[in-house]
Image (cartoon, helix red, strand yellow):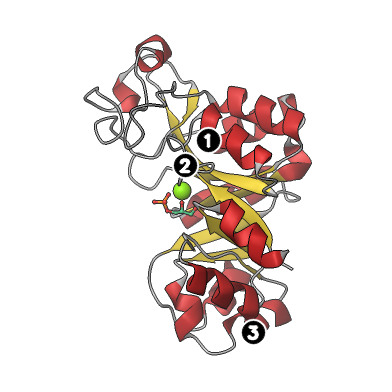
Amino acid sequence: MPMIYAHRGASGYAPENTLRAFALAADMHADGVELDVQRTRDNVLVVFHDETVDRVTGGHGFIADMTLAEVKRLRVCKPFPDQPDEIPTLEEVFSLLKARGLKCNAELKNSVLPYPGMEEQTLDLAAKTGMTGAMLYSSFNHYSMARIKQLDPTAKTGLLYGATLVRPWDYAKSAGADALHPEFTEVLQVADEVQRAHALGIEINPWTVNAPEHLRAMIDAGCDRIITNYPDRALAMLG
Ligand code: G3P
Ligand code: MG
């Protein structure tokens, strides 16, 4: 049975990547959450998807150009204007997840801005908050996942991508990763992808699976973790 990870928290119901969305995922009994990590000008890791704040807050500009104090003055208010919430630090989110017993897929957003040292910082914060054993790291920057392995060979890593690759399981194996994180349509298109990956000890953790028919297909394909904005839908299917 797959584990169900709430994408940016239960972001189908609450502002993405906020404590509100992560608490809601816990209330829905998700196994874990997926979240996105960016970094402020004063080097604090925060949980936010985009490099800029424009899409989901009333503000403007790059997170990397703002101090934490400036980031904390913003509110994530789109598309749920009646549920505004702060941009949380990664430490605040790890503390909530630890208290609620949730696992975490931390996606390092270091494929646009490089954020040097983000890997060490994230591993250290996971250790500080007691989350080390609950962590799975991922990134579209696959060198960053190699860096995670170099820093902690016991850390679990997943390779994110949005293409339909040829024999991605071989690539994951040669890159030293534990999991493939494909955009879910790849699993629909590549015959026996899950079986081929599993034969090499590689997990398949597709994103972002929201429609009931797609959730059903990912469950039936034997995926390991399903990343969805609607964890309640997926969990209802699993009974
Ligand atoms: O980690 C799965 C998914 O979140 C990757 O894409 O853009 O939603 O962060 P994105
Ligand atoms: Mg993400």
Depicted 170 relative to depicted 119: above or below: below
User: Label 3: few (<14), some or many (≥20) within 10 Å?
Assistant: some
Within 8 Å: ligand 2 and the Cβ of disc 1? no
Depicted 143 relative to depicted 21: above or below: below
Name the outermost residue toward the bottom: 191
* Helix, strand or loop status at disc 2: loop
Q: Please give the residue where the numbered disc 3 appears in the rendered image.
A: 196
56 or 205: nearer the viewer: 56
* Helix, strand or loop status at disc 1: helix
Q: Please give the residue where the numbered disc 2 appears in the rendered image.
A: 13
Q: Mark 1 and 2 residues: CB-CB less than 8 Å, in contact?
A: yes
| Image quarter hosting the C terminus | bottom right
Q: Amino acid at mark 1?
A: Ala
User: Left or right: where does residue 60 sit relative to residue 225?
Assistant: left
Q: Residue at x 52, y 83 (%)?
A: 167
Disc on the earlier residue, 1 or 3: 1
User: Left or right: where does residue 79 sit relative to residue 155?
Assistant: left
Nearer mark to the viewer, of 1 and 2: 2
**Residue 7, position in %: x, y?**
51, 49
Q: Amino acid at mark 2?
A: Tyr
